[in-house]
Image (tube, rainbow, N blue to C red):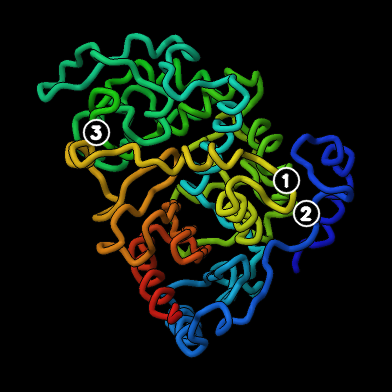
Amino acid sequence: MIGSLTRRGIIAASAAFLLASACQTGPSGPDLAAPSIVKGDAATLGFDPAKLAAISTALNADVASGKIPGAYLLVGRKGQVAFEQGFGVQGPGQTTPVSNETIFRIFSMTKPVVAVTAMTLVEEGKLNLDAPVSDYLPAFKDIKVWQKEGDPTPATKPMLIRHLMSHTSGIIYSFIQPTSPIAKAWVAGGEQRQDLNAKDWSEQVVAKLPMISEPGAAWNYSQGLDVLGGVIEKVTGKTLEEAVRERITGPLGMTDTAFVQPAEKASRFAQSQKQDPLYYDYTMKRVLYAGGGGLSSTAEDYLRFGTMLANKGEYRGVRILKPETVDLMLIDQTTADIRAKGLFFPGQGMGFGLGVSLVIDDTKQRPGNGTFSWNGIAGTEWWYDPKNDVFMVFMIQDRALLSEYQRKNRTWIYDALVK
């Protein structure tokens, strides 16, 4: 595995920290140096090997046609991997093949990581899901709501911490409907500033902008997790990067997941064949750590995080969350009315919990009820289906192909699941 010696070295160097950690169980400590990918027999795990092979044929054809320079797909069940393959190369003109150690910009797959970081603070009594955001960031006490005529009026309800995680806060992303008056107001008001840390950006910019709805009234995809990053900075007294590293990526051994990567890892990044300002240099130091989309990671690393959630908060003896806290994250925070009043694009049969989407009606979705997931704008995706005990990680770097491969992966994987 590419980078395995580096991983072992880093894990060994931090052994003292892990041995002292309250998360650790067992006399010898957690085996974090071992790969997260545990191979199993596809047929034994309930998959048709021929249908899995057809996935490989299809993705290889997409590479050969020039549709994508490369991709990576991992599919598993019952804690074991039934299918794992890199396709093509890391970018146009490159010769390095895609592998489970290729680093991808995961964009909004950052959101579940930041949500879990916040939930560790909830467990410690330092953060209250039902407290107003203004209890932590006072500038949010006097938020206003956009009106049709463009004259914002004071909100009648407070924005709560849980609203930030469930995209029901009234906060927006201007790029979703960039020509709308409210989106233009957000851009003009400094939404895209990068010169402030998450806490200051939240208070000095977002709190002064108009919300698209009353808090808790409608689902609109948003920078709520970026503001949550600001709350985490305020509560911990640390940068979001430090909080995530100390509470999530460090304890789980996710040595290739970071807001800023070391320069020596630049050659491991997957690159898009499309010119897009999204794909900035992740080895450059940042002022703003974006809780909604700033991480890069590998499939091997993200499987550690996904496995931790699938195992109710624990990965190889390291407990990040209590089982009841994970269950709390998987309670639908939406209603039919909330979904109808906003721009709810997870789709039919879906709800949304705290930082993750949820399948609530599997007569309208291929993954089983209770499946939790999220994706990144450049085509990365992860899910865990507890009903069928199926998990997947998919990685590309092409925003135009996100929806297409979401559909294809669901068809490929569930067609291959035969028992």
Is the residue 146 above or below the residue 141 in the image? Answer: below
Give coordinates of residue 91: x percent, y percent. Answer: 56, 67
Do residues under tags 2 and 1 come within 8 Å of each other at their CB atoms? yes
Mark-to-mark CA distance, 2 and 1: 9 Å
Q: Is residue 146 visible?
A: yes
CA neighbours of label 1 inside 10 A, class few (<14), some (14 to 19), many (20+) = many
State whether residue 345 is above or below residue 270. Answer: above
Residue that numbered label 1 is attached to: 318
Query: Which amino acid, by three-letter code, is at mark 1?
Result: Val
* Amino acid type at image mark 2: Leu
Q: Nearer the viewer, mark 1 or mark 3?
A: 1
Image position of 78 (left or right of 401): right
In the depicted structure, whether residue 214 falls above or below residue 322 = above
Quick one: 349 or 172, which is closer to the camera? Answer: 349
Could you tell which of marks 2 and 1 lies nearer the N-terminus?
2
Residue 269's image quarter? bottom right
Question: What residue appears at the point 45 percent right and 34 percent down from the top-left corner?
Answer: 225
Circle 3 is placed at which residue position? 218
User: Which residue in the structure is indicated by mark 2?
Assistant: 32
Picture residue at 34% right of the left edge, 37% below the top: 333
Circle 3 — which element? loop
Task: Point out residue 275 in the picture as x, y percentages from the top left corner.
Answer: 44, 57
Question: At numbered mark 2, what does the secondary structure look like: helix, strand or loop?
Answer: loop
Q: What's the residue at 42%, 21% (across, down)?
A: 130
Alpha carbon distance from label 1 to label 3: 36 Å
Looking at the image, tell me whether mark 1 or mark 3 is earlier in sequence order. Answer: 3
Q: Please state which amino acid type lies under the numbered disc 3.
A: Ala
